Amino acid sequence: MAEEKLIASFAVDHTNLKPGIYVSRQDTFQGAPITTYDIRMTSPNQEPAMAPAAIHTIEHIIATWLRNNPIWSDRVVYWGPMGCLTGMYLIMHGSYTPQEIRQLMIEAYQHLAQYDGPVPGAYPACCGNYLMHDLPMAKWEAKRYVQRLQDDFHCQYPNVQRPTDQSGATFYDA
């Protein structure tokens, strides 16, 4: 069996990747842009990955906040964790700069950092693993990420060459 072609996201140098916001993939669907953002919260392979219960809580609280945001709610396609537990993916209708998404993420994570209450959707009928939540750790991760976005913003993948298609458009892959 032939070796499968490596997808572009695996070409990202994860040994030098810093917390930040990166454009992971850009697609067009029915003539409209769809953009996937890499919301990288930790330095992969340099810092511990986030605890599953904390990232699950981050997913619930920020997904709820995004989908109720009067400006951005209609633009959000998906919000969810990376399998490596070093960040989240945000998929949006439209094409926004990492700087625009940075401000959105600062607001979302500040909301989480100040959140006091039950985790939205953390009930058996709403969640497949409703007992796996850690609000205190999620709040700690949120505070740390806001500080990182404010103090040392990264938005360009290190050592990445993006392939182009036949039309000359740059290819991104999540």
Image: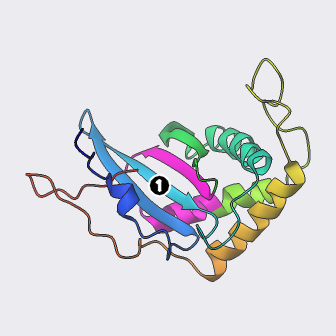
Using residue 87 as the reference point, say whether residue 124 is left or right of it: right
Image quarter of residue 122 = top right
Q: Position of residue 49 (x, y in %)?
A: 68, 60
Between 51 and 80, the residue placed more toward the observer is 51
Using residue 35 as the reference point, say whether residue 99 is left or right of it: right
Using residue 128 as the reference point, say whether residue 33 is left or right of it: left
- Asked if the stretch drawn in magenta spans residue 102, the answer is yes
Q: Position of residue 83 (x, y in %)?
A: 58, 47
Q: How is the image coloured?
A: rainbow
Asked if residue 21 is positioned above or below residue 31 in the image, the reply reads below
Q: Is residue 79 visible?
A: yes
Q: Position of residue 139 (x, y in %)?
A: 82, 58
Between 146 and 161, the residue placed more toward the observer is 161
For image coordinates 53% across by 49% down, the residue present is 89
- Asked if the stretch drawn in magenta spans residue 44, the answer is no
For image coordinates 47% across by 45% down, the residue present is 91
For image coordinates 91% across by 48% down, the residue present is 116
Quick one: which residue is furthest to the front in this view? 1
Q: Which residue is mark 1?
A: 37
Q: Looking at numbered disc 1 in the image, what kind of residue is underneath it?
A: Tyr
Disc 1 crowd rating (10 Å Cα; few below 14, some 14-19, many 20+) is many
Quick one: which residue is furthest to the top in this view? 125
Q: Secondary structure at mark 1?
A: strand
For image coordinates 51% across by 37% down, the residue present is 74
Q: Position of residue 46 (x, y in %)?
A: 63, 74
Which span is picked out in magenta? 86-105
Using residue 170 as the reference point, say whether residue 44 is left or right of it: right
